[in-house]
Amino acid sequence: MITALPDAHLRLHNFLESSQANGPGWRAVIWVQGCTLGCPGCFNPQTHPKSPGSSVPVAELAGRILQLEAHIEGITISGGEPLQQIGPVTALLRQVRQDSGLSVILFTGYTWEEIQSMPAAPGLLEFVDVLLAGRFMQELRVGQGLVGSSNKTLHFLTGRYSGEDLSHVPTTELILAPGGEILASGIDPILYE
């Protein structure tokens, strides 16, 4: 049952129903639109402007995710910057957690210390299993175990996953979209022209 506020909307860059390179097991992946952090070398610079992208009702997106529950282990939220839309992201995760057993992995460019100073952070973090925090730093690039650069910190907020679980996640996947577009995804995606 969807109980998210009907007027809550999320600026969405992309939604992928099934991925193995964005966390343990098969996962739905949500890339939000909008990020003001501007990390040099970011793989997703197209997600930085507040537009393009689409404004999607949280209840609708939660419904799409919940329809996939039998086929996925969890969801991964990336960006853009999810914490720059902390209200809608929290509403989405609350709904998914209320109505499913799906796990949640969230990537953010904010450091753990910055997150702790955000008044809305506790409400969000109660729905997150693994948080990967910190700005991407190209000179410290790692690209494995879901860690983009060595300054990023991993926060296992529940006992659902461990570092060992993340070490088995493929670093790259190529997905052929229904329209023939090739999507490169993962922590160390193959770049192509």
Image (cartoon, grey):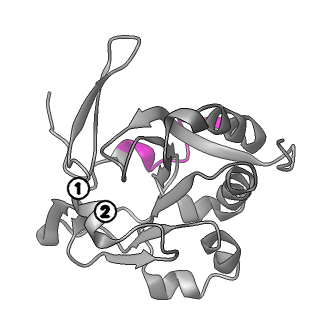
Q: How many marks?
A: 2
**Quadrant housing the C terminus:** top left
Residue drawn at x 73%, y 44% as measured from the top left: 58
Residue 47 is covered by the magenta coloring? yes
**Quadrant housing the N terminus:** top right
Residue extending farthest top: 179
Q: Tell me, yes or no, whether the two marked residues, 2 and 1, touch with CB atoms within 8 Å.
A: yes
Mark 1 — residue? 168
Say if 122 sits above or below 56 in the image. below
Q: Is residue 145 left or right of residue 74?
A: left
Depth order, front residue of 92/163? 163
Asked where in the image residue 64 lies, by quadrant, the reply is: top right
Question: Residue 165: which numbered mark, if any?
Answer: 2
Q: Amino acid at mark 1?
A: His
Magenta highlight range: 46-55
Asked where in the image residue 179 lies, by quadrant, the reply is: top left
Residue drawn at x 49%, y 39% as measured from the top left: 72
Q: Report x, y in % for residue 167.
A: 22, 62
Q: Amino acid at mark 2?
A: Asp
Element under label 2?
A: helix
Residue 107 is covered by the magenta coloring? no
